[in-house]
Amino acid sequence: MKLRLAYNAGVHWNYSNMLSALLLTACGLGWVGNVAPTSAWAGETSHVEVRLISDVAAVTPGTPFHLGLLYTIEPGWHIYWINPGDAGMATEATLKGPVGFTITGPHWPTPHRFDDPGGIVANGYVKQVLLWWTVTPADDWKPSLTGESGGESGDESGGESGGEKALTFTAATNWLACREACVLGKAQVSLTLPTGPTEPSSDAVIFGEARAATPVEADATDSLATVTTQTVGNVIHVSVAWKLAVKDIEVFTGNGADVAVDDLTVETKTEGALSNTIVNLAPRLLVKSSGNEGTRPSFPLVIAYRIDKDQQTDTRRALTIPINVPPHLPESTKASKPQPLESETH
């Protein structure tokens, strides 16, 4: 768990609060209790309701489907993305299912940037967000009367093929909800699905909205940009050639506890019907590396945008670009300030 806390007179989190939170976490105290999938608010102090939902009403062998944790957030409060920003704590979520199922995810919708008290900039979600997984039963999986719990998010094998008539999936999550003050919360929720022909559930529309809000891979066929990257020293230059004119660019770095990103710069220019965005960033290792390039950390660079003449829907979109930390980057040192490439100057 990564907990980022900043001391500021305008924020209720301070060093005493941080110590208390860590002690409560270590002792298993001070957290919100488990939440049933159909429950109301998860206690008076959590400010977040969590349910586990599916986009199908029944499961068919070999047919992928989606499960998701739906967070409903009390007005005025927010929870955090994988990189919470200047302060906060990344939301964490895991999903377990029966043996014979491959689970990948969670997939994170594009966050919003907002100001916490005290001038702290944070990345996260308000109102409602769905963190979702893709679940694939094995082709040779056959429903039967027995089965065991097996696959887990990130488990590509899913275990040996087996099956059961009623399939139970269990998700666990913890989060930090903030307004003027911050409150830790956690929940464990389960969902049981029958086997049978695949049909959309009543929650399928929520998944459609979540997929539309999730960044598209830069090299995907439906990507609206061509991306190139170049590393000069310890600075990574990312060039995004858009296939149309864009506006309202926002950049998020999904770096974890092992990498910091220094002096990120963003510039977008539009000429006629096309735009070009240049992102310069200098990642810096915060932990000791083995020196093996294959073990070097990577993180997503998310670029949110709107299409410039899309006045009818003004839909917020995003693409994600994998950033690999250069193998020669030194640990625990201040990175050089990014400078534009000569070809970028005008």
Image: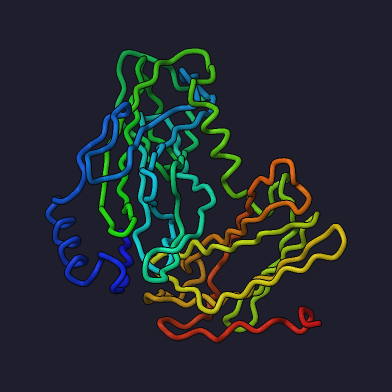
Q: Residue drawn at (72%, 68%), measured in percent from left and top?
A: 268
Residue 92, relative to residue 323: is it above or below? above
**Could you say where residue 122 lies in the image, as x and y percent from the top left?**
44, 62
Q: Where is residue 61 in the image (x, y as percent from the top left)?
A: 49, 21
Q: Which residue is drawn at 26% across and 53% down?
A: 183
182 to 295, vertically: above or below: above
Label tally: 0
Residue 221, located in which quarter of the rendered image?
A: top right
Residue reaching furthest to the right: 272
**309 relative to 8, above or below:** above
Q: Which quadrant of the figure contains the C terminus?
A: bottom right
- Judge from the rendering whether residue 112 lies leftward or rightward of residue 33; answer left or right: right
Q: In this view, does 185 lie above or below 255?
A: above
Q: Is residue 145 left or right of residue 318?
A: left
Left or right: 227 in relation to 165: right
Point out residue 95 in the picture as x, y percentages from the top left corner: 36, 39
100 or 117, which lies in front?
Answer: 117
Q: Nearer the viewer, residue 144 or 233?
A: 233
Q: Decide which of 148, 248 is in the foreground and name it.
A: 248
Q: Residue at x 37, y 57 (%)?
A: 90
Q: Which colour scheme is used?
A: rainbow
Q: Where is residue 24? Give x, y as percent.
A: 15, 56
Instruction: Say which residue appears at 44% left-offset and 48% top-offset.
Output: 126
Corner quadrant of residue 159: top left
